[in-house]
Amino acid sequence: MKAPEPAASPDVFPVLHVVNPEPVPPAGDPGALDEAEARRVDFVWSGLMVGSLALVFALLSVFGGVAVPVLLALTGAYAFNPLVTLLEKRGLDRTLGTSVLFFAGTLLMVGAGLYLVPVFRDEAAKLPGFFQRASTQVVPQVESLLGVSLPELVSQRTAELGEKASELLQSAGPTAARLVASFAGNTARFATTLLGLSVVPVLAFFFLQDYPRLMGSIQDLLPRRSAGLLTQRFREVDEVLSAFVQGQLTVGAILSVIYAVGLSLARIDLAIAIGLIAGFGNMVPYLGTGIGVVLALLGVLLSWQGPWQLAVVVTTFVVGQLLEGFVITPRVVGEKVGLAPVAVILAVLAFGELFGFVGIILAVPASAILKVVLSVVIQRYRRTDLYKGGARAP
């Protein structure tokens, strides 16, 4: 009679699945890793993680046309894997679940486009008048509120800025058309860009469909003796990345709705655009909120109807920040990312300077991974004789 297979350990990484796994020694088994072996495994893993991040950025710098679509597809598969896994647990075949998710996402994007494109078109049509009013009304409103007269130079420069901004916006359409035509003239670059954008959904579909198999193949390559420890480390990285990728997008969407609704109630022009900037810009601490506050106050000055507008704007941002700090982020993201605001700002500046726009996008997740690596290294260092002052490590 065939002996029953051992039950799966509850500590196994839920996203990874090993095909025909070999038994991994439990933590209390005599064959488990001792401290010296575990330290060596952790240090090797940390080096490989840092090297992998460096390789990703190198590939993006050298082979951006190929690497960016693959990276976008992998990111999409990683972000939506929990939804497909949930459908799979409900009895739906994974291929069918992936198809249902893509179909629903397509309908959602089309519906959002049909609604948002006319809204943004109407909002963009207001921009020239917005800047014209800014140049002629903001300074008098500020002088009225402060009760003092600003220097004549400020008024002149503000008027010039409004005229230049209006002219720039009015010529933005023809300029963009010329840029597109010039870019399209380079047939090879244009074709490569279109091909790269078109293959992202296709790659994401297949990555998402085969996600458990891909992760299982990776885990199956781990050394059997250290597979348990390495699985734990990858679980820690997964918690940080999922908290960022899924959590920050959710937080940004919720804040965008709160800000857009509040600014719309205040009857401010470009309320939806300002709400989106302030909401999703919140991924970089203080930046999105600061820009949103400045734009909203400018909108109040341009459409002044009474002190109630200012009160609604202030209440909107105060309530949004309180909800984000005490309710939304703790419940959606928690403390898994655990990066201080100053660290996030420095990471965005540094990665943006080194790798441009792609570096800005990847700054926070890369920093979060490095934080996990650093915590593992510090944890092992504190168990060494060097740290304990000659005491024997447990």
Image: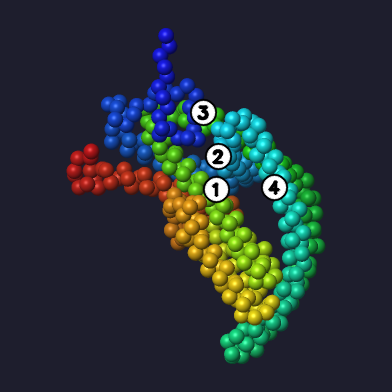
Q: Nearer the viewer, residue 304 or 56?
A: 304
Q: Locate residue 309: give its quadrant.
A: bottom right
Name the mark nearer the viewer: 4 or 3.
4
Element on which disc 2 rests: helix
Q: Residues within 10 Å of mark 2 (few under 14, many from 20)?
A: some
Q: Nearer the viewer, mark 3 or mark 2?
A: 2
Residue type of the residue flagged with mark 4: Leu
Q: Is residue 63 above or below residue 16?
A: below
Dot 3: within a 10 Å radius of its alpha carbon, few (fewer than 14), some, or many (20 or more) residues?
Answer: some
Residue 234: x and y, percent? 44, 39
Q: CA distance from mark 4 to mark 3?
A: 33 Å
Disc 2 versus disc 4: distance between alpha carbons? 18 Å
Give above or below for 328 relative to 205.
below
- Residue that mark 3 sits on: 217
Foreground: 188 or 259? Answer: 259
Crowding near the residue tagged with mark 4, few <14, some 14–19, many ≥20 C-alpha atoms within 10 Å? few
Q: Is residue 207 left or right of residue 125?
A: left
Task: Give the CA distance from mark 1 to mark 3.
Answer: 24 Å
Amino acid beneath label 3:
Ser
Contact flag, marks 1 and 2 (Cβ < 8 Å): yes
Could you say which disc has been placed on residue 82 in the image? 2
Question: What residue lies at 49% left-to-right and 29% top-to-bottom?
Answer: 17
